[in-house]
Image (tube, helix red, strand yellow):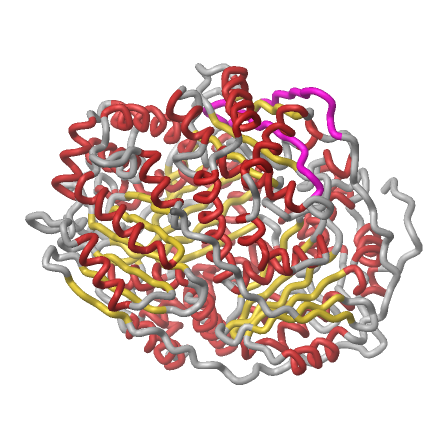
Amino acid sequence: MTAVRQAHRSAEEIGRTPAGPRPLPPLGATREVPLPDVAERTLPSGLRVLVAHRPGVPLAELRLRVPFAGPSATADPVHAATAELLAETLLTGTPTRDRVGIDDALAAVGGDLGVNVDPERLQLGGSALVEGLPVVLGVLGEVLTAATHPDAEVARERDRLVERIAVARAQPDTIAREALQRRRFGDHPLALETPAAEAVAGVPAEDVRALQAAALVPGGSTLVVVGDVDPAAVLAEVEASLGGWTADGTARELTAPPAPRAEDLLLVHRPGSVQSQLRLSAPALRREDPRYAAFQLANLVFGGYFSSRWMENIREDKGYTYGAHSGIERIPGGALLGVETDVASDVTAAALLETRYELGRLGAVPPTVAEVDAARRYAVGSLLISLDSHGGLATMIGSLAAEGLDLDWLREHPARLEAVTVEQVADVALEFFAPTAFTGVVVGDADVMGAGVRALGGVVGP
Amino acid sequence: MPVTASPLTVDLHRTRLANGLRVLLVPDPATPVVGVAVHVDVGFRSEPEGRTGFAHLFEHLMFQGSESLGKLAHFRHVQGSGGLFNGSTHQDYTDYFQVLPAAAFERALFLEADRLRAPKLTEENLRNQVDVVKEEIRLNVLNRPYGGFPWILLPPVLYDTFPNAHNGYGDFSELEQASLDDAAAFFDTYYAPANAQLTVLGPIDVDAALALVEKHFGDIPARPVPPPRSFGEPPPAGERRRAVPDAHAPLPALAVGYRLPDPAADLDGYLGHALLGSVLGDGEAARLQRRLVHADGLVTDVSAGAGLMGPLDARDPDTFTITAVHPASVDADRVLAAVDDELDRLAADGPSAEELARLVARWSSGLHRQNDRVMWRMLGLGARELLYGRAEITAELPERLTAVTPHRVRTAAAALRSGGRAVLRVEPTTREQA
């Protein structure tokens, strides 16, 4: 170093003190956290409304989920493109307000609304200072019943969407996700998360308006509101603002895809890539399954948190990656395990080998009592932390509702986690984490890493 | 009428241990979780020439064990107690934090104290973390479009001196040259207790918590702290331009960087710039959204704001940025001309009082949302206490923003138009396609 340096201790001197190592303090008493009651009403339109009071900051958070599958049982490029454009232009016009007028009304109460859509559902998320909640609900009601998707706005958003899709498709994570979805779901609608630019370019405004009339409907949809609010008053406000949102029929749920079958990993060539994306997947269990808690703990021990076998191996021991994560993803009719990491091109084969080794080891050398206990405490604690905000609680209530569950499931979950035995974790590990149970993709520069990866076997592609 | 901002309430208790460690205790009986953070007064601006990226690399080393804790013990103890952890390196500070169920409060203090007292710095862990940091840089910069845009790419255009201009993630060759002795020198120089700030937030009793803090941190010996250092440099005269190629980017991008007022000396002037960022870029009604995205159709997306790594996150000098991604068919100078035109309008007429009030309401709810989570509230309080000696800024922000006048925003726009600036262009390069 060029800077003038003061005298300093050596690394070894820094690492020890006269007193020596000290004992870890024990954990104190656990505080029980009461979850709020949820007030519920289903409006005559079929919209289900869930409201929870949570004291704290003077905000309200809302989440509206509308099942939004297309009519086709196979991936439909036109539906995907139209749905995406609908999401982009939903907040750009009503008979009484334009894009700027809508945003001004929201901003005046510190409010926000955002729309996103995927093959399964359309979601509107929003928030506001608590006294402004009626204003946000009013805007919400207005766009749900009377969004006009003006021709000029659709034309402009179409151009922007084409540009944004180009940017998204340049992201290695998007490229890998698209390859994985095709590998897992073939021509099922789930495979098509980002519409093709050409499909977007061909969508006329009248088709966007027609899709709203046909598909953006209250029956089967769920609205969640959480905040420092009076639930009874919020239910009345929702009824006043969204009571006029009615339609025949119910929102279309996505059909369950066939369970992905175990098969070779597909090698996808991305020239010039300096890292490779490993994306592996296998069947998992849903929350309502009696073995879900055991599955959750097995996943944590494998790769579900930093102190997992896989992360400690390929990051903290080998230095192959910055991050490695495995998680449970819910899909219609089931759930899947995702095993994901990005590694330098020249260690791709080595990282895949270690990944398969750790998957196999979870069954062959099952999690110990200490490993299961640590995962158990993490599962309970991280749940507590994730619920420690209005937004966290709103998202959780919405996600449970989408699975037909409620906060009672969450109240009982710590006890379920406590009851899991190491034998149950071992059984789940053996059944679900076997390397032969997986499919997936390896994306990267095949000229650099292809030969090494192929030599391991179980890999197809260029 | 826009809703008026309501104040945040925070109960702050500050003290200083005999070894110089600053302590900020923030009781909040409503939450079941506790947060513990250590902010150290060193960031990537302080790292020596020839060692770019060292402050961040050193942050990684602080997770690699200490006198009482083996290599993987920190992660395991935090998560095995039900908590989460992280650390991050900024221009002027490095933070280390944990959020856990309140039952693990003393354990969290123990874990932070042990590494502030006696981290175990070893050659093996250093080499391992150089590899991990290189993967972090590949992930976030080298293997993606717009990597390091604008936080790595813009400063070398706007600034002349090494501390302000260099890449805080570091060059691979310099990371590889980092030695164990560099790490020892860095720790002894910058990680003295009197150069750090401990923040605790949660359902604590102030006196009991302070006793535990004293128990775990009190016997860390005092060491001298480096004298305060200014990173000030003269603002640029005129416009500086640079273009960088990007093999992954499908569309060109543009970043414009300006200097900000010193938040320690002129907080209201700084907040005038922060609100100017909102007037320009926050929401569909913002000036640059309306003009560049919709009226003229020049750009795909645009944003504007104060602070290279966020508002009130650094000492002087810091950067006001405007960024845009635009189609290749649009010349960057047309984008720049439209930006200048909008700034000129604001410099002449200012925003309307209603327009400003709406944006303040949005800031206010954004601040409340941040402060709802123990982690963000703690990190905001700790950073402001360390940087400006005033955690109170967090609580005062809604009211101070409400007090910002249209005239002040007008003045900020005029300052951007009259001062020098940096213009960075990211240019897609054609690449062989498979």
Number of marks drawn: 0
Q: Residue at x 34, y 43 (%)?
A: A105
Rendered image quadrant of residue B231: top right
State the quadrant of the C terminus of chain A.
Answer: top left
Q: Is residue A368 left or right of residue B59?
A: left
State the quadrant of the N terminus of chain A.
Answer: top right
User: Please, is residue B230 above or below residue A432 in the view?
Assistant: above
Q: Is residue B5 left or right of residue A6?
A: left
Residue A81 horizontal/vertical position (percent): 25, 32
Q: Which residues are magenta?
A: B235-262
Residue A267 horizontal/vertical position (percent): 41, 37
Q: Is residue B256 magenta?
A: yes
Which one is in front, A176 or B90? Answer: B90
Q: Residue at x 35, y 78 (%)?
A: A416
Residue A285 horizontal/vertical position (percent): 29, 63
Return the residue found at the far left: A248
User: Please, is residue A55 above or below residue A248 in the view?
Assistant: below
Q: Is residue A365 visible?
A: no
Q: Residue at x 44, y 34 (%)?
A: B286
Q: Is residue B88 magenta?
A: no
Which one is in front, B15 or B152? Answer: B15
Which one is in front, A268 or A163? Answer: A163
Q: Is residue A369 left or right of residue A91?
A: right
